[in-house]
Amino acid sequence: MSPPTPRVSAVGRPPPGDLALMAVGVAAVSTSGPLIVATAAPALAIAFWRTAFATVAIAPYTAVRYRREIASLTRRERALAVLAGVLLAAHFATWVPSLRYTSVASSTALVAVQPVWALLAARRMGQQVPSRAWYGVAVALVGVLVLTGVDFSLSGRALFGDLLALVGGIFSALYVTVGSQVRRSLSTATYTLICYASCAVLLSVVCVVGSQALTGYSQDTWVKLLALTAGAQLLGHSVFNIVLRTTSPSVVSLAILFEMPGAALIAAVWLGQHPPWPVLPAAALILAGVAIVIGSGAPGPDPAAALPAQ
């Protein structure tokens, strides 16, 4: 019999080891946006390869360790895991291209609104929502309006990128919501394998139909695709999954919000991408609103499935 999972305080201070691991995880996911911008490949192809490489990386372990669970999957579990993969593909198909139109700072801030959309989905399903959470929603949405207004004043192209990022955040919230249903009975490894594989298959079809080149890249591009997979796709979120055992999901979610300033800093130093100054207070409003939502004790999905998709 396995030892019981330690009880985790909703807002307690994480163990020192978890703090170090979360710092590594935040650094890893912060590279996602800048790496995508710097990768000379079609946006949808980038989304395909990161999920395809991740699937190949986790398949051997999952197939051996969880072969009995995979063999005993119910039709409902299989369908929900595949649906989550479809929603993840829709997230990548909107968020990744957004980085071609708007700044890394704007895109990562807008997609960070995902917990707000997840909260609205929970309310739609009849769950109770604390009143404090609605204050957070209001603050975050004011930030969204300010940020998109700033980008609209710059160009219609930037505004289009903002809209793609917002839609990407909505699909990410739906992905998390569906994933939380199937994660009640499936291990993280089995769920992730089916979800990533389904996402990769769908994106490959979209790339082929849309005549998006999946090969013929330079060696530098392949290195960046592997770095994106190893960093944001595996190291970042795998580390967060590890610390969720001993650190509350609220604390982990708050830590992940540091991706936005981290990504913006990397983009500024590495890519010379400096967003106009009004973007920064708008992004701060968004992150503050999301932090209020997370800290309100609002209902949410299973912690192990609740990580952002970036």
Image (cartoon, helix red, strand yellow):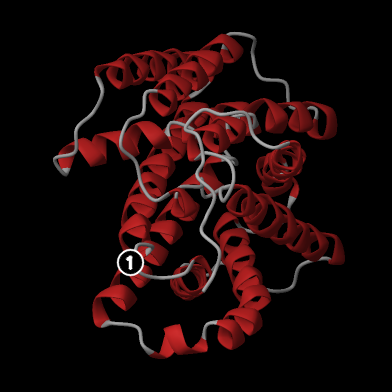
Point 23% across, 28% down: residue: 129
Q: How far across and down, in percent of the image, does residue 267 sit? A: 75, 32
Kindly state the secondary structure of the residue where label 1 is placed. helix
Q: Is residue 233 above or below residue 24?
A: below
Q: Quadrant of residue 25?
A: top right
Q: Quadrant of residue 123?
A: top left
In the picture provided, is 32 more to the left or to the right than 224?
left
Q: Is residue 269 above or below residue 233?
A: above
Point 59% across, 74% down: residue: 55
Question: According to the image, label 1 marks what residue?
Answer: 83
- Between 165 and 177, the one lying in front of the other is 177
Q: How far across and down, in percent of the image, does residue 66 sit? A: 52, 82
Q: Amino acid at mark 1?
A: Leu
Q: How far across and down, in percent of the image, does residue 249 sit? A: 50, 40
- Between 218 and 250, the one lying in front of the other is 250
- Between 212 and 227, the one lying in front of the other is 227
Q: How far across and down, in percent of the image, does residue 121 sit? A: 25, 41
